[in-house]
């Protein structure tokens, strides 16, 4: 399965890269008045292209060039679709089996186990944390496939212009380092958000389940205040986290824009590149910006959700220790006369005295005994 | 507050549009060998530009042109940041106050009310549905601001070339209609996903809360199967919904690519536009693609979440009818002697016979009476 994903991701990157790279010969073709002979002599890339087109018996015209761009783009879109569908499928499978296995483990646990863990925290584990484990795997895939695309683009840019690529890589590398430094608090805030969210769900489950006791003890006003405080904390943390996320744009975009503009200036006034070459460079940079942002975001999601994997594993282990099995060895189909306890004793696990000893009771069939 | 958001959204669109539009004179400037005098005579847009630059006493060079592009882009990035932060703030405020008011209402409800509603469904209302109401408002904002940006871009494209704009608008309009038709099932599947998710949370809360009864009645295996069935339904629905979402890309992108490529072909071979004009057209189209996708997605989010608003309102109304208040009119600071019931009668709301009648009890202070 991993091989399948790898193949899809790499072929997607190849189609994407070649599709964008094809814009260079197209723009050169337009810039030079659609003269194939002159271009083949001047540009190495056109020499190759003419050979490829000859091989499939096609003339090099604006129409065939654009048609090949279209074909590459279609292949890219198709692989992107497959990648997305496969990634969602895997994420959902992971969530589904985690959910079921956790529920099964907790149902198989000893009675005494539920005295130690709260229902609220188990529900949080099976719902919220399980979903987060799924998205942590999803973001890992996204990081991998976006890295492949970035790598491929860098190679292509390098083929168009060596100096400009080094320049762009240095600026973008510096920008990433800066953004990384600026949003380094995200992981902490994300953990705080999770904790606050957990606490809110936990409080809600516990308080609403014991609604009557709260009303009887006249602590409803205090509980409302408590929920308000925890809810405000959730609100503040999520706001803070989104502000940090918005700051990625605030810091990354100006650097990319500055990079693009200085590249445009340098390409014309220093490297005296053709408008076609400059255009392709700008197109690829514009395309790289969202991929870069997604990379940074996937990394953050992975970081934020990686804690959940630990929580889930711990939950499994904890329940595993106290597994009891789903039933006894005797099967109970129907009562003949009733249930008879003869000389039954019971002692709580941590206490020495017997709570019940020498108990003899008979519960007759068909009668309700409270 | 709405005025503030409106101002931010519109100025963001203006900065974005002018920033992209400025690429036209920049590319024309490069294409024509940086000759201002010749360009002013040939292009109307350059005439205006020279006047604006004269007004602020700046020469028209590649450096000053690029600097003004940079300035406009920075302003756009800043307004985008403000828009994002404001939208998150508002969404979180809505969630926070909905959460608290719902919890308060349910705490103030009569005892009997909780016999009719399940804890699981109340928790689902306060957690999941409240978050969805927040995102429905958030997506409404996103739709508005993206519509403003699209409108502004269409006006700009129209100024560059009338025929090409009509051509592009027709193709993109047709594409949107097609995509709209293809993903028309999304709303239904999204509702099914919500229902399945609700059922899963509900089952988990109810089953894990009554863990002991399930074990006592030896129905754990059946419950595990039940959770597995519901969890599988959640998995299938989410997978289906994401497949539909991925299909937006699968259908929209080829149309946009085809549109871009045929525009490139038409601009050169039919309308004989300059490479600079064609380049700006392609740049704007490339920029419009993600905005279009976001519009379609925001619309879907809004549609999917709009049901939650109804659920929340209904929950408020239902609890409102049975409000009891947080306490009686007498304040109870300390017991002097104890609590005395004299001739107390009690009847259940729907029954005629008295359950208690003429009850006389005295609970003395400082003693625990069960």
Image (cartoon, coloured by chain):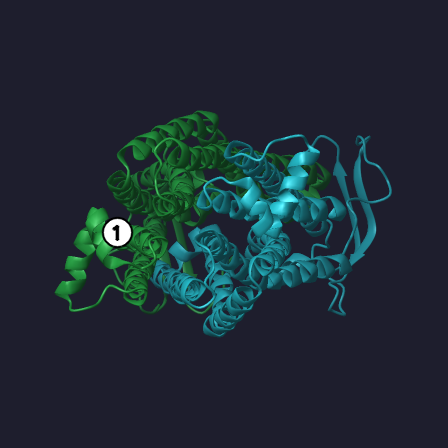
Chain colours: A green, B cyan
Residue plotted at (66% across, 63% down): B310
Task: Name the foreground residue: A242 vs B268.
Answer: B268
Task: State the image coordinates of residue B204 (x, y, percent, origin top left).
Answer: 45, 55
Task: State the image coordinates of residue B39 (x, y, percent, origin top left).
Answer: 55, 46
Which residue position is annotated with label 1?
A9
Q: Chain of mark 1?
A: A
Residue plotted at (42% across, 37% down): A264
Task: Name the foreground residue: B128 vs A120.
Answer: B128
Residue A208 appearing in the image: no
Residue B147: quadrant of the picture: bottom right
Please rate how many residues cluster around mark 1, counting C-alpha atoms within 10 Å: few if below 14, some from 14 to 19, many from 20.
Answer: many
Disc 1 element: helix
Task: State the image coordinates of residue A188 (x, y, percent, origin top left).
Answer: 47, 28
Residue plotted at (44% across, 50% down): A127
- Left or right relative to B353: residue A231: left
- Left or right relative to A272: residue A7: left
Residue plotted at (26% across, 51% down): A9
Residue B299: quadrant of the picture: bottom right
């Amino acid at each position: 399965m991993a091989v399948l994903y790898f193949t899809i991701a790499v072929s997607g990157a190849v189609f994407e890269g070649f599709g964008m790279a094809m814009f260079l010969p197209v723009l050169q073709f337009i810039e030079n008045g659609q003269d194939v002979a002159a271009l083949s002599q001047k540009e190495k890339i056109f020499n190759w292209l003419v050979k490829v087109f000859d091989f499939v018996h096609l003339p090099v015209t604006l129409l065939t060039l654009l048609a090949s761009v279209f074909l590459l783009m279609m292949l890219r879109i198709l692989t992107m679709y497959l990648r997305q569908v496969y990634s969602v499928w895997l994420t959902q499978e992971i969530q589904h089996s985690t959910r079921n296995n956790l529920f099964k483990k907790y149902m198989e646990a000893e009675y005494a186990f539920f005295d130690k863990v709260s229902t609220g925290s188990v529900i949080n584990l099976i719902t919220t944390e399980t979903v987060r484990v799924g998205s942590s795997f999803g973001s890992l895939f996204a990081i991998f496939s976006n890295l492949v695309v970035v790598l491929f683009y860098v190679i292509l840019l390098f083929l168009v212009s060596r100096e400009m690529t080094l320049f762009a890589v240095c600026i973008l590398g510096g920008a990433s380092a800066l953004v990384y430094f600026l949003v380094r608090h995200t992981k902490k805030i994300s953990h705080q958000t999770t904790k606050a969210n957990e606490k809110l769900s936990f409080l809600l489950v516990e308080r609403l389940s014991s609604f009557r006791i709260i009303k009887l003890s006249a602590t409803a006003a205090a509980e409302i205040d408590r929920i308000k405080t925890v809810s405000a904390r959730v609100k503040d943390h999520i706001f803070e986290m989104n502000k940090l996320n918005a700051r990625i744009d605030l810091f990354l975009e100006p650097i990319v824009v500055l990079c693009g503009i200085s590249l445009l200036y340098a390409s014309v006034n220093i490297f005296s590149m053709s408008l076609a070459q400059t255009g392709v460079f700008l197109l690829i940079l514009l395309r790289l910006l969202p991929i870069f942002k997604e990379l940074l975001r996937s990394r953050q999601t992975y970081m934020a959700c990686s804690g959940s994997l630990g929580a889930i594993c711990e939950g499994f282990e904890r329940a595993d220790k106290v597994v009891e099995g789903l039933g006894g060895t005797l099967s109970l189909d129907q009562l003949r006369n009733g249930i008879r306890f003869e000389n039954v004793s019971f002692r709580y696990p941590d206490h020495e005295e017997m709570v019940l000893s020498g108990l003899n009771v008979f519960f007759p069939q068909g009668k309700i005994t409270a």
